[in-house]
Amino acid sequence: MDKLNDKYDEAAKVLPEEIRAHALFLPDGDKSAAEEFRLRCGRPPTALIRGVEKPLCDIRVTQSMLESVVSAASSASRHSVAECLKKGFVTAPGGHRIGLCGTAVVRDGRIESIRNVSSVCVRIARQIIGVSNGLIERLSDNAGRPLGTLIISPPGDGKTTLLRDLVRAFSTRGVRTAVIDERGEIAALSRGEPQFDVGPYTDVLELAPRAEAVACVLRSMAPRLIALDEICTETDAEAVGTAVGSGASIIATAHASSMEELKHRSALRGIISSGAFKRCVAIENKSGKRTYRIGDI
């Protein structure tokens, strides 16, 4: 529990000081079960605990408090996280993803930044070693090589946690693995060293667009397994196709409550039918307890 609470305390560092004090005062049991902090302008801050948002205190969040969260997460340099802000998030040290809402700055139909931040969601990044136990054999072929696997669930139900542990498990078995860590939350590199255990034979390319990153690691690192988080676009589908065409297996995550829902998305329909993925792991979350259902694709 101590390690889980260490990550909670680490995530709380980006909160405004007056709110942080209340967050750190929660009982250890609530800290270990907390998944997110949510701050909305004009309303009290909350923590998502066992699937329920609970107020941390009666302090009303101000816009300056929200801006201080972005500043803390970006080490006071919005310029350094400009590309991430276009996508509505910034990743704090330790791999904690901070989602943003507010007024979008749009140019040529694309979001260039977010100003007048109105709410933030601080997702507490945790590693749960062994969460893939009991799954890895069913996600491997007869020779122990990883099969193409797609992990699905609604947002916030543990896809990245499972992906990270599968990477660690396959790498520990000697599979040369590349992690495309576009948001910096799978491995959470710090001065080049992963802050999460992603295995001894894993290489990480962080904060790069997926398509370019996949091509890069195929040229430079020759992985047998490539991990991608939250594929959703035509470009992501092309990246998967490139990897599979080069002989690498893919483990990826996607937002969906079922395979049927996923198949209705034009961006991914083709890659699913192409055979790039052999297995699907659907995560079900009931009151904070997760179960994993494996099926063929």
Image (cartoon, rainbow, N blue to C red):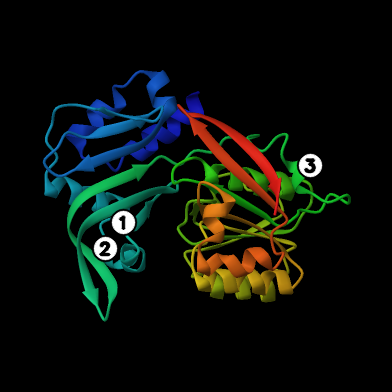
**Drawn side of residue 46 relative to residue 125, left or right:** left
Residue at 63% over, 67% down:
271
Q: Amino acid at mark 2?
A: Arg
Q: CA distance from mark 3 to mark 1?
A: 40 Å
Residue at 64% over, 38% down:
293
**Drawn side of residue 85 relative to residue 268, left or right:** left
Q: Mark 3 Cα within 10 Å, few/some/many (few <14, many 20+)?
A: some
> Circle 3 — which element?
helix
Label located before the other in sequence (3 or 1): 1
Q: Is residue 120 positioned above or below 239 on the image?
A: above
Q: CA distance from mark 2 to mark 3?
A: 44 Å
Would you identify the image quadrant in which residue 101 lies? bottom left
Residue at 66% over, 74% down:
242
Q: Is residue 250 positioned above or below 200 on the image?
A: below
Residue positioned most to the bottom: 108
Q: Which mark is in front, 3 or 1?
A: 3
Q: Amino acid at mark 1?
A: Ser
The residue pinned by badge 2 equals 78
Q: Nearer the viewer, residue 45 or 142?
A: 142
Task: Tell whether label 1 touches label 2 (CB within 8 Å).
Answer: yes
Task: Tell whether label 3 touches label 2 (CB within 8 Å).
Answer: no
